[in-house]
Image (spheres, rainbow, N blue to C red):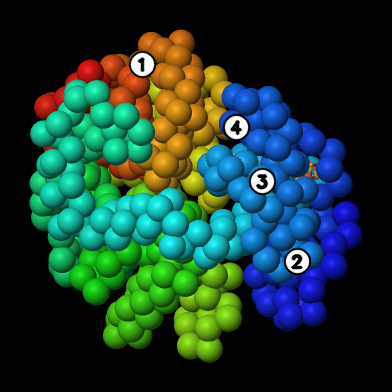
Amino acid sequence: MQVSLPLARQHDPFFRAAESAYQACVHCGFCNATCPTYVLLGDERDGPRGRIYAMKEMLESGAVPPTSLVPHLDRCLSCLACRTTCPSGVDYARLIDLGRAQVAQDRRWSLKGLTRRVLATVMTQPGLLRVAVILGKAVSGWPIPGSIGAAVRVAHGANPTRGPVDGARVFPPLGPQRARVALLAGCAQRAVAPEINDATVRLLCRMGCEVVVLSEIRCCGSLDHHLGHAARAASFAAQAVSAWRAEHERQRLDFIVTNTSGCGAHLKDVEFHLQDRKEGASSAAEMASIMRDVTEVVAALGLPPAVPGSALDVAYQSACTLQHGQGIRDLPKELLTQAGFRVHGIKEDHLCCGSAGTYNIVQPALAGALGERKAHNIGLVAPEIVATGNVGCMLQLRNFVDVPIVHTVELLDWATGGPTPLALDAGYPRHP
Ligand code: SF4
Ligand code: SF4
């Protein structure tokens, strides 16, 4: 499909990338079958093919997409199931990212724009987010409608305590050192599920890693990126890359480890996001080359021997940003099996659970329908535990599923000598 960029945009790398993505699309519609919003709504405009077509006008005018089409773009989860399915290799992310950024810029002074900026500000500051979660828990169960009610439901499954992995720390290896890694402690995750970082550090240290956490990295920019705040997302990413680069120059880092798949997917693509910055683009390429999801590092170094007794039935929920964003599908299941768990796949595991960054707050109805659908499919395998690689999925599923939901790394840590995961010990009862 041909598209002509306006003169003013012909040298804009983000428009050029979107143009290439658009041109690769042959409008076959295969992607509609795996798109969660198309599956739920059955409307061509709410599927990838319709959205790609809608963005033609944006590319040709160089401006915001037509107002009538904005709600259909807003309903996109950025799950990238369409990118996985597409036989023509259309990089849908390049189109929707640009579309979202244009929309966010256009409505920055509207109530919607303001709400999204407040959301991004709170969620990227762990101190503020902890206070918000505590307040949310205090009113849990109240019949609050809309996005505020949705945020309260998400807060219900959160743990707003401070973990040991907060602020700058160096965690020495247990035994001889085999690798030196930097862990992205994250912003929101640190405030809602510190147990994930604790388990990650314990497991990596047990495997012989020195683990460095840099306090100057506040956020990787993933959350803002998802909301279309392109400039703020790039600033966060540039700051993180520069901090890791400085640490790498001081003493070599073998890997930068992420345990939140949304952040990992964003950071593996950081070279693209920072390409128009004079400083930072080459550092971004170098740092992206050592960026790994925690499961990739565990596989590279080898899982320590499992302690007998972990033979529980685990349903594995494959986070979209891990399977579609980073192309990691089977590895977490293989590691869990190696650790002694009986691992079960979930029907329709390509479909998003409805979490998708802040989607379950800004699009509560669709997110709820996806959560119910995922819970039904999980119920079919009757697991004792559900494991996933993203904190957002954990909080979302705790609203719909009665069995404990944990991060994959918590199970790997537990099976190799760590403590019982918090969700199994204390439990997170389903939201009333
Ligand atoms: S994105 Fe791919 S699968 Fe979807 S319509 Fe275009 S070519 Fe077909
Ligand atoms: S990113 Fe997900 S929700 Fe958006 S069009 Fe693609 S499959 Fe559909």
Residue type, mark 4 in image: Thr
In space, the residues marked 4 and 1 are separated at their CA atoms by 27 Å
Pointer 4 or 1: first along the chain: 4
* Mark 1 vs mark 2, CA separation in Å: 51 Å
The residue lying toward the viewer, choosing from 183 and 310, is: 183
Q: Which residue is mark 3?
A: 69
Q: Assess mark 4: CB under 8 A from ligand 2?
A: yes
Q: Which label's residue is closer to the chain start, 4 or 3?
A: 4
Q: Nearer the viewer, residue 255 or 226?
A: 226
Q: CA separation, marks 3 and 2? A: 15 Å
Measuring 65% from the left and 70% from the top, which residue is drawn there? Answer: 14
Q: Is residue 267 left or right of residue 141?
A: right
Q: Are marks 1 and 3 in contact (CB under 8 Å)?
A: no
Do the residues bearing badges 4 and 2 touch, measured as CB atoms within 8 Å? no
Considering every residue shown, the one lying at the far bottom of the view is 278
Q: CA distance from mark 4 to mark 2?
A: 27 Å
Please give the label number shown on residue 61. Answer: 2
Image: 174 above or below 86 = below
Amino acid type at image mark 2: Ser
Disc 1 versus disc 2: nearer the observer: 2
Residue placed furthest toward the front? 110
Whole-angstrom CA distance, mark 1 to mark 3, is 41 Å
Residue under the image location 56 percent in, 40 percent down: 75
